[in-house]
Image: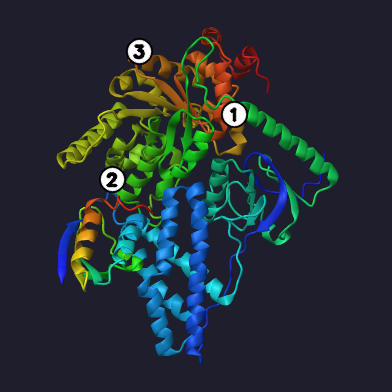
Amino acid sequence: MDRGVDLKGIGVSPGVALGRVLLLKKTEYKIEKRQIVDVGKEKSKFLHAIEQSIQELGFIKGKAIKTLGKDKAAILDAQILMLKDPEIVLKTVETIEKEKINSEYVFNRTASEYIVVLENLESEYMRERASDIRDIIERVIRNLLGIKKVELSNLEKETVLVAHDLTPSETATMDKEKVIGFLTNIGGKTSHSAIMAKTLGIPAVVGLGNVTQLLSDGDFVVLDGAKGELFIEPSEEIIKEYTKIKKEQERVKSELMLFKECEGITSDGKKIEIFGNIGTPEDVAFLLQNGAEGVGLYRTEFIFMDRKAFPTEDDQFCAYKSVLEALKPKVVTIRTLDIGGDKELPYLNIGKEMNPFLGYRAIRFCLKNHEVFKTQLRALLRASVYGNLKIMFPMISSLEELLEAKKILAEEKKKLTEKGISISSEIEVGMMIEVPSAAVISDQLAKHVDFFSIGSNDLIQYTCAVDRMNEKIQHLYNPFNPAVLRLIKTVIDNGHKENIPVGMCGEMAGDKELIPLLIGMGLDELSMSASSVLAAKKLVKSSAYEKLKRRADGIANMGSVQEIKAYLDIRG
Amino acid sequence: MQRVVVILKNETGLHARPASVFVKEAAKYKSDISILTKGQEYNAKSIMSVLSMGVIKGEELMIIAEGEDEKEAVDALKALVEKNFKWIGV
């Protein structure tokens, strides 16, 4: 049925939004060098613009402490100090007097010198401060030229943000209460704006092509972040239909909110940990809002992406520490670097591989690049005292790899201890089970780790030899495949024989159709995206383990997906 | 002229918050205050200058003050670094 969808993009964050558009334009200005006559007037114009900028930042800071927390507020504080900095303000004034040149040119030149200095510093954190200088230069020059700009941190009403793409600084400062949707020209499922939208629970459609040209400020739009659909100035009928959908979604959501504080325990008293997956420290807030009982998978790859060189130990330490502190005393399971496969680093040339998923990735890379691996392990060990850390190795396919990774970890631990650096004595060390060979010898591996976490996406693709990116064979990628389920059962039983818990992180763990089966098979922990946590808790609360166990035992002798699905009464 | 050597103990180096606290404290004094580290001199009253030092944990800073309140300035800034910038909130 044609419902008159105006534009189709990639739906990256589910939910429906109806509202008016705010177009995020880059402030464009040209800084020209001009000779001036009235030096006094130029000086007072400049100082006025500085004063105005300080006031603006003071206002944003006042709001930021509440919405963004102290760290972000400290950055705004540093920006205010930059505007009072004698090295740039006095120097600009002096240069205006001496050279009789216009203030925007002089200020830009003077402040930009520090961008170069900071960009050459070793610490990523400091290099990021260079963007703070860019921000203040832009702010002052805008005020000098009298250009108005939308303050994302101070929106008056609910807004659908429309932009070519959203930058991290834009998403970090925006008023999360007022932004009800994102629409962007470019991007895909893993682009920054997509991840942020999902993390914050804001409906979003990306990859819309030229949406910034089609829309202008104040246009009314309806967007569906699950289907990736956009309606521009839609008919009454569509508005009615979507208002209804939105109300229904809100009702379901508020109903689920009742489970936020509940523990994941079945009706007959078996504890199932309901954890969340995160990619960056920014994801923590939404995770907690959704009642996750801990982090079952912190993908550290994001710290390594979107940059020009490997992150330093301190850069990593800061990220791990902030997550551990925010969740304390809850568990935070941090997975060591998993690059390669579909995740490439721009500054690391591994070279094209025939079969990247069967290639040089994750622990295989780390065990050949000791410095990268050790740097991460040191950052993790140092951060361990700030919370409840578990370290997890990805892509282990043999006992030798596991033992080598553990040996390197022990060495780094010893070195740090000798230096007098305190490390938590309770760090658990575990591994992912995502390669069939590891699943098969999980009885042996279990003797050497504190926990297993099954990575279902890779386990399915490796067990069934199905490239999960290849659309032609999508029908073969199926979590109900009996071979996959048997392997999972083997891993759970082998883990339990050695008294270690077995969890799962991956799409399967958040799937409502699979959760009852997984619990019945004996899984102790499920880790999923934040938006699935509440529904999973509800499901666990309303299930009886003994019943699910008997049901799960019944699939032991089944040989096909159809048979299993029919038995579990799952359609499709 | 007063001078004193301190070692930075802050885990994450002199990043935005401690740098801001330090510069604000320095600005309270009339003396000229500078920091000597890694063979270069920086203006202690300039946030840009302090951030550009790029100092990390364990590195040495020499705080130098010259002026009517040089003694107080050096003492206060030394204490600030040693107490990990904690006693003045942002």
The single residue placed furthest to the bottom in the displayed view is A37
Task: Judge whether A473 appears above or below A132 on screen.
Answer: above
Question: Earlier along the polypeptide chain: callout 3 or callout 1?
Answer: 1
Question: Same chain for the residues at labels 1 and 2, yes or no?
Answer: yes
Task: Judge whether A340 appears above or below A128 on screen.
Answer: above
Q: Is residue A210 visible?
A: no
Mark 1 — on which chain does it sit?
A: A
Question: Between marks 1 and 2, how big is the CA–CA gap?
Answer: 40 Å
**Looking at the image, which residue is at 46% across and 28% down?**
A293
Q: Nearer the viewer, mark 3 or mark 1?
A: 1
Q: Which residue is mark 3?
A: A497
**Looking at the image, which residue is at 70% across and 55% down?**
A21
Question: Between marks 3 and 1, how big is the CA–CA gap?
Answer: 37 Å
Q: Is residue B78 visible?
A: yes
Contact (CB < 8 A) between labels 3 and 1? no
Q: Which residue is mark 2?
A: A375
Q: Which residue is mark 1?
A: A257
Which secondary structure, mark 2?
helix
Question: Earlier along the polypeptide chain: callout 1 or callout 2?
Answer: 1
